[in-house]
Amino acid sequence: MKRGHGETWDPTPQPPSGSCEGPSMTDSINKGKMADDSNMDELLEVLGYKVRSSEMAEVAQKLEQLEMVLSNDDVGSNVLNDTVHYNPSDLSNWVETMLSELNNPESTDLDPTRICEDRSEYGLSAIPGLSAFPKAEEEEASSKRIRLESVGSWGDPAGEELTRPRPVVVVDSQETGVRLVHALVACAEAIQQQDLNLADALVKSVGTLAASQAGAMGKVATYFAQGLARRIYTSDLLSGGSHVGPSFEEALQMHFYESCPYLKFAHFTANQAILEAVTTARRVHVIDLGLNQGMQWPALMQALAVRPGGPPSFRLTGVGPPQTESSDSLQELGWKLAQFAQAIGVEFEFKGLATESLSDLEPEMFETRPESETLVVNSVFELHRLLNRSGSIEKLLTTVKAVKPSIITMVEQEANHNGVVFLDRFNEALHYYSSLFDSLEDSYGLPSQDRVMSEVYLGRQIVNVVAAEGTDRVERHETLAQWKVRMGSVGFDPVPLGSSAFKQASMLLSVFAGGDGYRVEENEGCLMLGWQTRPLITSSAWKLAGA
């Protein structure tokens, strides 16, 4: 599966698709309209309404009048119950028309079966690729509208004046979602242009809209709003989230592991590549560049334990953050893995390496034994964190090359969050994390604690991508195409993962929540896991060029 990585959103409003009142406007009218648009209120225009700054007071007065009319029991309930009023962008004329129709219901055509094209200038087509807003199958589903409904039964007797329900305005949730997206992008644009006054107003409107938007879009928008607010209200760009210890980050990752198949897919495909690389080896040494909770290795040891001819010895070097004086979590984890290996009959050896940065590692730290061991280097969601400092990724890859591994297994996010242009990075991240939150929302049987903690895990990444700059911005994800260039420049060639890994990964997804929505695709020997049509993570394998 191939995809373009340079896609961005164009938040500029598109011209109306049509009108139910007559033929298209002439060029001269369009020119006059463009001149009038220059006087529109900036904030309301971003949110989809056209109100001239000079008409703000008049529109507010009309809205108050409309509210009084809607609360009047003398208004015919049948007229309100059976009427759909579409929500055009011209707010002033819409309110005036509503007042006229409600004050003179017998003289106005309020046939609810009348079909009218959507006259709003903001449509879902302006937001390509956002899985939170799939294209509707029918034209009516994509219309932005306000429906006037009654609170209570539609079958109430018309003669019972005291029990007649009062009409209320119910806003289409899809309309709210579209406005929310446009407000987010407009706020990011204002920040890019250093218009902090407009950005301040927009980020506040985002908070209001997000609070009223149910589901994944409301949640993901809240985290993006938090990142935008950090850029607006702080003089120094922050790291995107409060500083917490590595144990908390690992706990969040554990919940993410339980909530969705992304980490399971990462571990499974990497282990499959390792098993194929050590088929005949009697001694296996794996260097894990991010041990975390060691969740990947029990499954590999089980596979080695049942290998024909008996299991090989297994040596694991796990890299982690510096340990505290009160605890040594690396060694504690090593003991747990040793007990597991003993229980299944695998000879096991463990060494923990604590370091502030992977770029600080040196070849001699790994104590390799090339004459007797088959060496593997493994990295899951670790390498992109080195892109915040110039030369760091090159330093690590040079160190890895020096120890001459038989294979390198690597899993990374399939996204471009390392661009220098803030707005491009923001748009890409909004697409990417909307898909991730969608997939979490679709896991109906997921325990609430796992879902909430997984959302926090992803939310911290969002805030870092949006709010941080310089060395504080560590979530610098890159695409497979970009990693191929990096790996090739240091002297590594890709290793195809093979059809067996593809089939077994597909089986893994089929037993995870039925596999609905998740997709596995092969891309030039690498495997991608995605939600619906968007790839989200990529698993790949590499070897020394010419080996």
Image (cartoon, grey):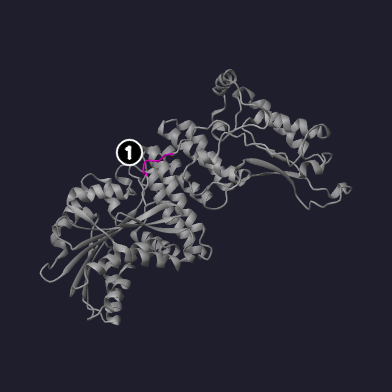
Q: Main secondary structure of the magenta part?
A: loop
Q: Is residue 350 visible?
A: no
- Give the x, y percent position of residue 19: 64, 31
Classify residue 322 as left or right of residue 422.
left
Where is residue 107, by image quadrant? top right
Which range is magenta? Answer: 4-8
Where is residue 59, by image quadrant? top right
Q: Residue at x 67, y 32 (%)?
A: 20
- Give the x, y percent position of residue 347: 22, 78
Establish if 311 lies above or below 496. Answer: below
Q: Which residue is mark 1?
A: 420
- Give the x, y percent position of residue 532: 46, 54
Classify residue 441 as left or right of residue 468.
right
Residue extending furthest toward the left: 371
Residue extending furthest toward the right: 159
Classify residue 514 as left or right of residue 351.
right
Q: How many marks?
A: 1
Q: Dot 1 lies on which element?
A: loop
Q: Residue at x 13, y 57 (%)?
A: 402
Q: Is residue 189 visible?
A: yes
Establish if 117 lies above or below 534. Answer: above
Residue 509: in magenta span: no
Mark 1 Cα-neighbour bin, 10 Å: few <14, some 14–19, many ≥20? few
- Give the x, y percent position of residue 81: 77, 45
Front-most of residues 217 and 309: 309
Front-most of residues 350 and 531: 531
Q: Residue at x 36, y 51 (%)?
A: 414
Establish if 7 lies above or below 521. Answer: above
Classify residue 539 as left or right of residue 64.
left
Locate the C terminus by quadrant.
bottom left
Residue type beneath disc 1? Val
